[in-house]
Amino acid sequence: MNARQRPSESVDQRALVEWMDLKGIRYFSVPNGFIAGGMNKWAMLARLRAEGMKAGAPDLILVDRANTDGMPVAVEMKRLRGGQLSPEQVAMLAAMRTAGWHIIIAPGLQSAITQLEELGF
């Protein structure tokens, strides 16, 4: 399978969201990569940062906690091959882990599903 045939991070995340919807898992996304139209890009970035957008925030936050002993769960999706954490993601995820979060770093859809099932979802 060449790079063009591999699912993108976005495709895998959309598939994971569909799976979580089918399982009845409540979650929300953290759209840090989103830039809305109709506004100057830099003005929008400044507004989002002022509202609390942080580099390194994970892609998905789960509301349901399954068998995690009450610990919150965050999911960071990565491309199946070649996806790497940025330095900001490493720092943010480490801080969340220290604060008691279950952190799932998922290279691809199946990795995310497997790790969520291991947590009892």
Image (tube, grey):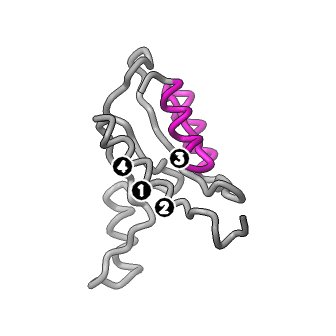
- Give SS at disc 2: helix
Measure how far apart labels 3 and 2 are at the Cα level.
Answer: 14 Å
- Give SS at disc 4: helix
Q: How many marks?
A: 4
| Closest to the observer, 33 or 49 | 33
Q: Are marks 1 and 4 in contact (CB under 8 Å)?
A: yes
Report x, y in % for residue 90.
63, 46
The disc labelled 4 sits on which kind of residue?
Glu
Reading the chain from its start, which is encountered first: label 1 or label 3? 1
Q: Which residues are magenta?
A: 89-118
Measure how far apart labels 2 and 1 are at the Cα level.
Answer: 5 Å
Above or below: residue 69 compared with residue 53: above
- What residue would you read off at disc 4? 18
- Give SS at disc 3: strand
- What residue would you read off at disc 1? 14
The disc labelled 3 sits on which kind of residue?
Glu
| Closest to the observer, 2 or 52 | 2
Report x, y in % for residue 59.
46, 51
Measure how far apart labels 1 and 4 are at the Cα level.
Answer: 6 Å
Above or below: residue 57 compared with residue 63: below
Residue at image position (36%, 51%) is 29
User: Of circles 3 and 2, which is in front?
Assistant: 2
- What residue would you read off at disc 3? 76
Reading the chain from its start, which is encountered first: label 3 or label 2? 2
